[in-house]
Amino acid sequence: MTAPVFPLARSDAPAARGEVATGVALVLLLVATQVYALTTSPPERDMGHLQKIMYVHLPVAWNLMVSYLIVAVASLRYLWKGRPGDDLLAAAAAEVGVLLTGLTLVLGMIWAKPTWGIWWTWDARLTSTAVLFFVFTGYLLLRSFVDDGERRAQWSAVVGILGALNVPIVYMSVRWWRTLHQVQSDPSTLDPQYTLGARINAVALCCLVVFLVRFRYRTALRSFAADQLEAQAALGAR
């Protein structure tokens, strides 16, 4: 078991302010990269300015894979070593991953309506992404319903690993099946006029994702430490 990490004390206030400042700076960085991409790239030949939703949609879709990679690695580490910290890290990454997956679906639907003429179709890419969203939503619900900490961590680790196995399916779905969705978008398939904007937005969002995972992880560690102290106090009072 990891050593207790005590809740935020008054002496930690400067560190807390530093976290807030870092979060604000990363949000402003993401806004700046969005503005740069939107104002410097030309309208696409067929979609016009609608194409520029790509600068949000692609970075979000790319970074959800980062989140679920963290879930998978941390879950495997928990099953191997049984350290609560790995379970808490997996849960923090899953929270961010669910947010990004939901945004990916919503942004994809907004893009689909004017290009495909419909908000939703049971396309392989859309369907597999929806499955990913519901699996990890279930992961978070499981954690909220199971009171026993060790059992919750074990079950969550198994669900997290199995859910993460869907990520390569989502990525390869446009190649394995015939779909309305275009093939994977990456710097090698993008027009050079749009590559830089996509890259800098992906990097900026990745920095924000890492910050959010770290923030939620540290918050969970504090809560875990507080629960441990409360349990020890209850045992000592008997």
Image: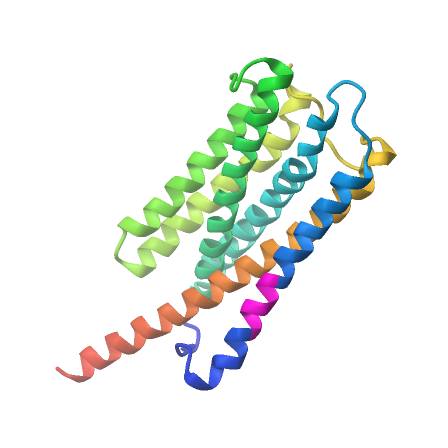
Report the quarter where the C terminus lies. Answer: bottom left
In the rendered image, residue 181, in percent from the top left (x then y), is placed at: 65, 21
Seen from the viewer's position, the closer of residues 88 and 95 is 95
Seen from the viewer's position, the closer of residues 23 and 66 is 23
In the rendered image, residue 235, in percent from the top left (x then y), is placed at: 19, 79
Q: Is residue 46 left or right of residue 22?
A: right
Question: Which span of residues is magenta-colored?
Answer: 18-24
Question: Is residue 179 visible from the viewing direction of this image?
Answer: no
The part of the image, by quadrant, that contains residue 87 is bottom left
In this view, 7 is above or below 103: below
In this view, 167 is above or below 46: below
| Farthest residue, direction left | 238
Residue 235 in magenta stretch = no
Number of marks: 0
In the rendered image, residue 53, in percent from the top left (x then y), is placed at: 66, 33
Q: Is residue 94 left or right of residue 138?
A: right
The part of the image, by quadrant, that contains residue 172 is top right
In this view, 52 is above or below 161: above
Q: Residue at x 66, y 50 (%)?
A: 31
| Farthest residue, direction front | 39
In the rendered image, residue 158, in percent from the top left (x then y), is placed at: 43, 46
Seen from the viewer's position, the closer of residues 224 and 7 is 7
| Farthest residue, direction right | 192
Question: Is residue 149 visible from the viewing direction of this image?
Answer: yes
The part of the image, by quadrant, that contains residue 182 is top right
Q: Residue at x 49, y 59 (%)?
A: 89
- Prevailing secondary structure class for the magenta stretch in the rendered image: helix
Q: Is residue 117 left or right of residue 37?
A: left
Q: Residue at x 72, y 45 (%)?
A: 35
